[in-house]
Amino acid sequence: MKYESMVEIIKDGEIVIPMYLYKLYPSLGISLESFIFLMYLRSKGDMIEFDIEKLSKTFGIDNKTIMKFVGELEVSKLIEIKLIKSDKGVMKEFISLDGLYAKLGLNMTNNVVKEINDNKDDVESIFRVLEKEIGKQLSPMEIEIVKGWKASNYNDDLIKEAIREAVINNAVTLRYIDKILYTWYSKGITTIEEVEKSRKSFREHKKKEEKKVEIFDNDEWLEGNEDN
């Protein structure tokens, strides 16, 4: 495919590659040139008349190269050449893109299933951590509480960190963990880094307060000595 011809086709807006198709490209097992040719066919509809001369002229390449693209796409089951009779009874060849859309649909379905399974694994992972720390199997109500945390967009790392803090404070109950999460949420804390920053700030504040109390106690001790 001539570079100049390809640039002109893209400039004319005849080839538009949606992001979901661009992401699908590596899994198709075809060359970049064949992919661009496929995207051109897609821009022309679901059924395109198989006119080699016209396609050759559009892309500025010979008929042999067009047939090479068509052959690669057929082998990959992305297109199919179909003979269709016109209203006048004339048989013509058309390029069907049903294979592309079938593969696209399967890819989207697999991604949805993967996302569901990933989320399921994340929730079950939190269940296992909780059951280990609590020392018993979660009740149906407790399971719903954990699902509620997920639905409230608390990320898994934050939930596990709240469980860890509950363990440190020797108060591993869902009510206490829920309180920790709500406290972080009310402060706008959404990451582990922000949790650590908040803890550091609290420790520094507590240290200053303790220092003030210590100074105050020393002053009282001095005053007491002066009275004596």
Image (cartoon, rainbow, N blue to C red):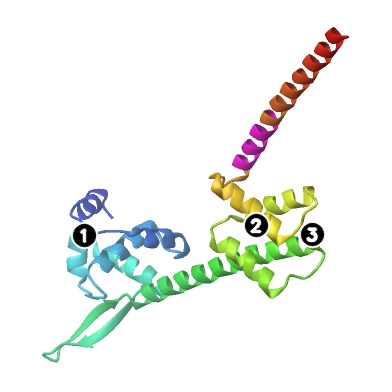
Q: Label 3, on which residue? A: 133
State the quadrant of the N terminus. Answer: bottom left
Residue 15 lies, in percent from the top left, at 25, 59
Magenta part of the protein: which range?
A: 193-204
Give me the residue at 68% from left, 54% from top: 160
Q: Is residue 47 above or below residue 164?
A: below
Crowding near the residue tagged with mark 1, few <14, some 14–19, many ≥20 C-alpha atoms within 10 Å:
some
- Does 198 appear in magenta? yes
- Specify which label sits upstream in the sequence, 3 or 2: 3
- The residue sitting at the bottom extreme is 89
Q: Label 1, on which residue? A: 14
- Specify which label sits upstream in the sequence, 1 or 3: 1
Splitting the image into 4 quarters, where does residue 73 fall?
bottom left
Q: Is residue 205 above or below residue 7?
A: above
Residue 94 lies, in percent from the top left, at 24, 79
Residue 179 lies, in percent from the top left, at 65, 54
Q: Label 2, on which residue? A: 178
- Does 28 appear in magenta? no
Give me the residue at 30% from left, 68% from top: 67
Splitting the image into 4 quarters, where does residue 202 fall?
top right
- The residue sitting at the left extreme is 88
Tell me if I can see residue 119 in this picture: yes
Give me the residue at 53% from left, 45% from top: 188
